Amino acid sequence: MNRRGTDKIISVYWFAILFIVAAAVVYMVVVFYGTPYDVREAEASAMINQIADCITKDNKLRTGVNNDNFLEECHINLGKENKYYVEVGDLEIAKGNMNLNEFCDKKGNKLPKCVERKLYVLGGEIVEIKVVVNNVK
Amino acid sequence: MKNKKANILTENIIFIVLNLVFLTILILFLFSKASDVSFLEEKYAKQIALMIDSAKPGMEVALNMSEAMEIAKKKKWEEKIVSIQDNVVTVKLHEKGGYSYSFFNDVDLDVLYFYPTQDEFKFKVVKYK
């Protein structure tokens, strides 16, 4: 039996397996470190908290906040890049990039993040606040 | 006979050396990715942006950036590490780097820049714009 020939073939297989394992490790590392931190849900929650504080006073709905003065009253700057969409159901407030609203029914890590919360106020009213964030880089 | 043994030894040594070189390259790659500066820039930019989003007027915030300071010193970066302009936070730890992230809270801050002279980045939310 040609033992040296067999040894050479085995070492070729050995390097091929080593290369495949190394390629898999490199791929996993690149994917892990290449994925950005996703803080969109935290950002949406912070915005909902700010809106909730803004539209309520003494646990009741505040009068005087409407679609026209919403951003100034609640001190929110949606920027120029259409990364946000905000909707407050009962007050008929809708600001930002309305195209982001359609992503609320879809699921996916790369899609805009949609967060909805219900706010219970005195008087039995339930106010729905929806925020969609597409702040990615 | 001796020649055969010498050949086998040489082949085995080359085989082992090639394996070691291969593994060394792989480990160096892993370490370089783990200590990548852009990862840290992103982390700090998003952290500061989220803190500003959650803050209210009168709040003072202090963020420990000693890790960022060390890296900026290693990279010999003496310009602004953190800058805040037009509701965008930018963290830069070396000349060709930088990560920006926007925040929605329309507030005025008392400090808009952070240079690598202190370990803590302190800022106060003064008022709403």
Image (tube, coloured by chain):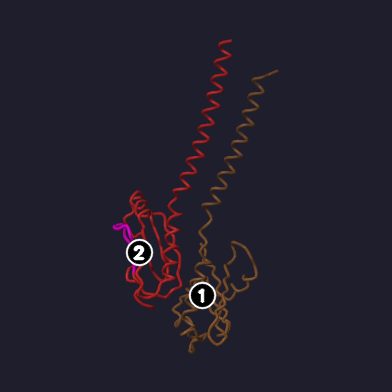
Give the residue at x 57% y 18%. Answer: B8
Q: Is residue A14 magenta?
A: no
- Mark 1 residue type: Ile
Q: Name the residue under label 2.
A: B62
Asked if A28 appears above or below A85 in the picture, the reply is above
Q: Quadrant of residue B109?
A: bottom left
Q: Is residue B116 magenta?
A: yes
Whether tag 1 and tag 2 are in contact, CB under 8 A, the answer is no
Considering every residue shown, the one lying at the far bottom of the view is A63
Give the residue at x 59% y 44%. Answer: A24
Q: Residues within 10 Å of mark 1 (few under 14, many from 20)?
A: many
Q: Which chain is red?
A: B
- Residue A89 appears at what percent x and percent y? 58, 82
* The C terminus of chain B - image quarter: bottom left
Range covered by the magenta-colored residues: B112-123
Q: Alpha-carbon distance for marks 1 and 2? A: 24 Å
- Residue A104 appears at what percent x and percent y? 62, 71
Q: Which chain carries label 1?
A: A
In the picture provided, is B106 more to the left or to the right than A90?
A: left
Asked if A53 appears above or below B115 in the picture, the reply is below
- Mark 2 residue type: Ala
Q: Name the residue under label 1.
A: A48
Q: Which chain is brown?
A: A
